[in-house]
Image (cartoon, grey):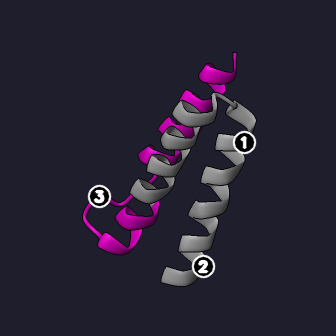
Amino acid sequence: MPLGVMVILAAYTLRGADWGAASSLVPTVLALAVTVGLHLWLRNAVTSTFAGTAVYVALLALVF
């Protein structure tokens, strides 16, 4: 079930991304990379989901 939740969250985030604007693309891609990397490294869905969300929100706050 955790994998299903992560796929739904990723699909929702990627669906709303503006692929033409770098200011929207960079935070999305970096947060996705952090989430996938942490999940592959730690095998902990909760940690990787929260860390990816934190990175995404922090990058959005810095970009805008």
Which is more N-terminal, label 1 or label 2?
1
Distance from the alpha carbon under mark 3 to that under mark 2: 19 Å
Q: Residues within 10 Å of mark 3 (few under 14, many from 20)?
A: few
> From this viewpoint, is residue 44 visible?
yes
* Quarter holding residue 47: top right
Residue 2 position within the rendered picture, expressed as x and y whole percent measured from the top left:
69, 22
Residue 23 placed where, x, y %?
Answer: 38, 74
15 lies above or below 7? below
- Residue beneath disc 2: 61
Q: Which residue is mark 3?
A: 19
Give how far apart the Cα atoms at labels 3 and 1 are.
27 Å
User: Going from the N terminus, do you reach mark 3 or mark 2 first?
Assistant: 3
Magenta region includes residue 6: yes
Q: Residue furthest front?
A: 41
On the image, the x and y values in percent for residue 61 come to: 60, 79
Residue that mark 1 sits on: 47
**Relative depth, front residue between 20 and 42:** 42
- Look at the image and tell me whether residue 64 can be seen: no
Q: Earlier in the sequence, mark 3 or mark 1?
A: 3
Kindly check if marks 2 and 1 are in contact, taking CB atoms under 8 A apart as contact. no
Mark 1 residue crowding within 10 angstroms, few (<14) / some (14–19) / many (20+)? some
Region of the chain picked out in magenta, as a range = 1-27
Going 69% across and 15% down the picture, which residue do you hit? 1
Residue 60: give its label. Answer: none
Q: Nearer the viewer, residue 25 or 45?
A: 45
SS label for mark 3? loop
Side of 54 relative to 60 (left or right): right
Find numbered disc 2 in the image and state the secondary structure of the residue it sits on: helix
Q: Residues within 10 Å of mark 2 (few under 14, many from 20)?
A: few
For badge 1, the amino acid type reads: Thr
Amino acid found under the numbered disc labelled 2: Ala
* Tag nearer the camera, 3 or 2: 2
